[in-house]
Amino acid sequence: MKKEKKTFLDNNKSEDFIQQEMLQLKRVTKVTKGGRRFHFSVLMLVKDDKKKAIGFACAKGNEVSSAIKKAVRKAKKNLVSYFPNETRTVPHDIFFKFKATKIMIKPAPLGNGIKAGSSLNTIFKFLEIKDVSAKIIGSNNKLNVVRASFLALDKLTGKRNNW
């Protein structure tokens, strides 16, 4: 099943054009004396085309739609612009460790494309980076991969964000 990007116009601000992609959807079950209680956890990646900024958020809800709305709202508050000018690749190699996840990002030659797995591929597409090579070593937990990649991008560009 191929994931598709969903785009929509925000009702509050009609001038903002937001792209969103669901990276992970989990059904979480809590077993109680009365039976099972189901909740949903969503990891969303959001891009604002006007500001050329991206952000991510993880949210929980009783229904999938409410969890998605919460995650998108939280992600909009955490938007960061890493490469305001259009860039083809990352400036230099970087190796970053976050908990059990290690990420290695390298610039690639012109026309090589995005060679990255899992959530990293989506992040680079949202950043409009065309040629990059990346490797996830250790844990493939999607939330930790996304956090590690954003922290690596912070270190790469000199930004300071508290994810």
Image (cartoon, rainbow, N blue to C red):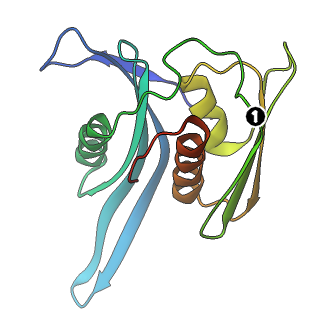
Q: Position of residue 64 (x, y in %)?
A: 31, 47
Q: Position of residue 65 (x, y in %)?
A: 27, 42
In this rendering, is residue 104 above or below 3?
Answer: below
Q: Residue at x 71, y 28 (%)?
A: 91
Direction left: furthest residue: 12
Q: Residue at x 48, y 17 (%)?
A: 84
In this rendering, is residue 10 above or below 75?
Answer: above
* Crowd tier of the residue under label 1, counting other residues whose Cα lies within 10 Å: few below 14, some 14–19, many 20 or above: few
Number of marks in the image?
Answer: 1
Work out whether residue 26 or residue 71 is closer to the camera in this orientation and state it: 71
Q: Residue at x 37, y 72 (%)?
A: 29
Q: Position of residue 47 (x, y in %)?
A: 41, 25
Which residue in the protein does label 1 denote?
A: 92
In this rendering, is residue 5 above or below 102?
Answer: above
Q: Quadrant of residue 70?
A: top left
Q: Quadrant of the N terminus?
A: top right
Q: Quadrant of residue 119?
A: top right
Q: Quadrant of residue 79?
A: top left
* SS category of the residue bearing label 1: loop
Work out whether residue 139 or residue 38 is closer to the camera in this orientation and state it: 139
Does residue 89 appear in the picture of this structure? yes
Q: Amino acid at mark 1?
A: His
In this rendering, is residue 39 above or below 106?
Answer: below
